[in-house]
Image (cartoon, grey):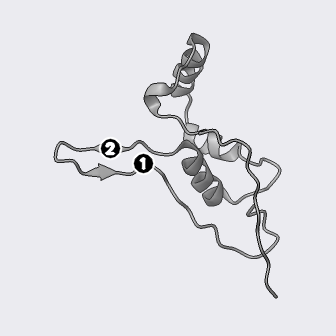
Amino acid sequence: MVHNTEIEVFQIIREKKKYVELAMDQDVIEIVKSMNKTKDLYNKLASSIAPEIYGMKDVKKALLLLMVGGSTMEFKDGVKIRGDINISLIGDPGLAKS
């Protein structure tokens, strides 16, 4: 059995912006600063992902790191380290992987 995939595109808009292109207003800056004082922020943010799914803390932490991403680094000698994080989520069917 052979399947063909066809996508018709009218417009492509780049969603990912460079850090220099991002603008944050003062309200967002204050919220981020207040979150800095929160104890156990990493676990709280991870548990806020899909709260209706019980457990799976490691999966939620991996998804959090995937969403937040890393920062690209470029050294003086021209070597670049990619900041994107890739994960492969493997498990039994029906375990809310999508």
Image location (x, y in percent) of residue 16: 56, 39
CB atoms of marks 1 and 2 within 8 Å: yes
Front one among 9 and 57 = 9
Residue 32 against residue 16 in the figure, above or below: above
Q: Which amino acid does label 2 sit on?
A: Met
- Label 1: few (<14), some or many (≥20) within 10 Å? few
Front one among 59 and 8 = 8
Camera sees residue 58: yes
Camera sees residue 40: no
Image mark for residue 19: none
Residue 26 against residue 67 in the figure, above or below: above
Image location (x, y in percent) of residue 21: 48, 26
Residue 19 appears left or right of 97: left
Q: What residue type is labelled 1?
A: Gly
Residue highlighted by disc 1: 83
Q: How far apart are marks 1 and 2 (CA)?
A: 7 Å
Residue 64 against residue 32 in the figure, above or below: below
Residue 75 appears left or right of 37: left
Image location (x, y in percent) of residue 52: 83, 50
Image location (x, y in percent) of residue 43: 60, 45
What is the residue that sits farthest to the top in this orientation? 26
| Comes first in the chain, label 1 or label 2 | 2
What is the residue that sits farthest to the bottom in this orientation? 1
Q: Is mark 2 on a helix, strand or loop?
A: strand
What is the residue that sits farthest to the left in this orientation? 77
Q: What element carries label 1?
A: loop
Residue drawn where x is 77% and y is 74% of the image: 4
Q: Quadrant of residue 68?
A: top right
Image mark for residue 73: 2
